[in-house]
């Protein structure tokens, strides 16, 4: 997904942009680090409650603190389940965001810190790619 394409896909979901934050691989995609296979969002509890009543969204993955609503390749959460940082919700994540073409994303620093906490093989590869990206800037 190209950067513009990814941002446009987020906008096309129809969730008010001031009530969502992109998390996960979308952050890497918008910076051109690697492609995203899906769109992961943390939304306000009001938006989540509205989507939960919409039959086009179904209950999906179970996280350690919550579950996601899923529609095609989109996952919507009320919080970001992490091993060391607890379960930051929309309000907790807001100070760690940047706006790119009108869409809010958690910062690359935040993603790197979270991946360093989890330390999976995939996370460590992403951290390496984030470092390479920063060196090239």
Image (cartoon, grey):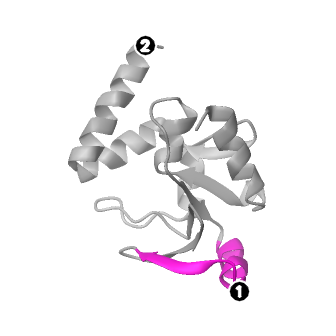
Q: Is residue 12 above or below residue 99?
A: below
Q: Position of residue 127 (x, y in %)?
A: 31, 35
* Residue at 68% over, 39% down: 5
Mark 2 Cα within 10 Å, few/some/many (few <14, many 20+)? few
Q: Which residue is mark 1?
A: 53
- Picture quadrant where residue 103 is located: top right
* Residue at 35% over, 21% down: 132
Q: Is residue 133 above or below residue 119?
A: above
* Residue at 42% over, 22% down: 133
- Picture quadrant where residue 53 is located: bottom right
Whether residue 29 is in magenta: the answer is no
Asked whether the viewer can see residue 107, the reply is: no
- Picture quadrant where residue 51 is located: bottom right
Question: Which residue in the rendered view is the most extreme toward the top?
Answer: 136
Q: Which residue is mark 2?
A: 136
Asked whether the viewer can see residue 30, the reply is: yes
Q: Is residue 49 above or below residue 21?
A: below
Circle 2 sits in a helix, a strand or a loop, which is it? loop
Q: Quadrant of the N terminus?
A: top right
* Residue at 57% over, 48% down: 95
Whether residue 49 is in magenta: the answer is yes
Q: CA distance from mark 2 to mark 1?
A: 45 Å
Q: Which residues are magenta?
A: 45-62
Q: Position of residue 83 (x, y in %)?
A: 29, 62
């Amino acid at each position: 997904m190209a950067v513009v394409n990814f941002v446009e896909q987020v906008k096309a979901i129809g969730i008010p942009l001031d009530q969502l934050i992109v998390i996960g691989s979308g952050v890497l995609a918008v910076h051109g680090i690697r492609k995203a296979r899906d769109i992961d969002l943390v939304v306000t509890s009001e938006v989540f409650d509205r989507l939960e009543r919409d039959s086009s969204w179904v209950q999906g993955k179970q996280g350690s603190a919550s579950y996601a609503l899923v529609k095609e390749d989109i996952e919507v959460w009320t919080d970001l389940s992490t091993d060391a940082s607890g379960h930051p919700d929309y309000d907790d994540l807001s100070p760690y965001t940047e706006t790119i073409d009108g869409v809010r994303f958690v910062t690359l620093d935040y993603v790197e810190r979270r991946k360093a906490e989890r330390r999976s093989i995939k996370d460590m590869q992403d951290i390496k790619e984030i470092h390479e990206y920063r060196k090239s800037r």
